[in-house]
Amino acid sequence: MKYADSKLNAYLDHRAALVDYVTSITGCRARAEDVVQDAFLRFVPEGGAASTPSTSGIAYLYRIVRNLAIDLARRSAMENRHQNEETVEWLKPREESSPEQTLLRHDRLERLAAVLDELPERERVAIEMHRVGGYTLSEIARRLEVSTATAHRLVRNAVVHVAASME
């Protein structure tokens, strides 16, 4: 590859200042070095004609460096934004529980089933519909053929009984 000597000399004369300039934009000296090298390849294309660097030639080099640095900063910001987005809950790896935790959870569920069996049938059905099925109090009232206030009382009594028994 044959580069124009005058452009090469201009680049070499201003290289340190260019790196400092890009470092202020990117915040990373290593990235600034890469940007300045990319700018050189654009400033002196392969087979470029030899010309004397004028003030506009150096200005053009600074413009190339600035545009590449801003593009890099935008690309980095976009990548960080995508990496920091919340992942969907079901895509996250599930933490494996220890055998002790599994046994404790199983014992608690057995205890809860026993406590629910102690409840009168209407209270048990009401709490199961409300807490497990997600039914509203008016839907529970229609199913049990009682008033909404009675459905609320059934759920409340069941919750109080379960809470007291599980402690």
Image (cartoon, rainbow, N blue to C red):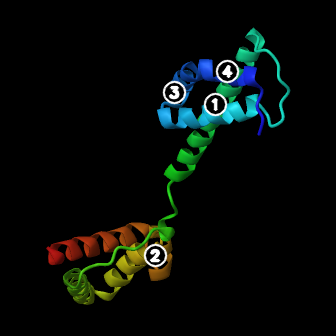
Q: Secondary structure at mark 2?
A: helix
In this rendering, position of residue 40 left or right of residue 16: right
Examine the image and state in which quarter residue 71 appears: top right
Numbered tag placed on residue 140 in the rendering: 2
Between 166 and 82, the one lying in front of the other is: 82
Asked which secondary structure carries label 3, the reply is helix
Q: Which mark is residue 9?
A: 4
Q: Earlier in the sequence, mark 4 or mark 2?
A: 4
In percent of the image, x 22 and y 80: which residue is there?
Answer: 101
Judged from the image, the secondary structure of the residue bearing numbered disc 4 is helix
Which residue position is annotated with label 3?
Answer: 23
- Give the CA distance from mark 4 to mark 2: 85 Å
Asked whether, in this view, residue 69 is left or right of residue 147, the answer is right
Calculate the distance from the C-alpha at mark 4 to the C-alpha at mark 3.
Answer: 22 Å
Image position of 79 with respect to 4: above or below: below
Residue displayed at 76% across by 30% down? 44
> Which residue ends up furthest to the top in the rendered image?
55
Location of residue 16 (image quadrant): top right
Q: In this rendering, which labeled residue sits more in front, label 4 or label 3? A: 4
Q: Earlier in the sequence, mark 1 or mark 4?
A: 4
In the image, which is nearer the foreground, mark 2 or mark 3? 3
Give above or below for 84 relative to 35: below
The kind of residue tagged 1 is: Ile
Name the amino acid type tagged 4.
Asn
User: Which disc is residue 50 wearing?
Assistant: none
Mark 4 or 3, nearer chain start? 4
Callout 1: few (<14), some (14-19), or many (20+) C-alpha neighbours within 10 Å?
some
The amino acid on which the numbered mark 2 sits, given as a three-letter code, is Ile
Query: Which residue reaches farthest left?
Result: 167
Task: Mark 3: give few (<14), some (14-19) or many (20+) Cα within 10 Å.
Answer: some
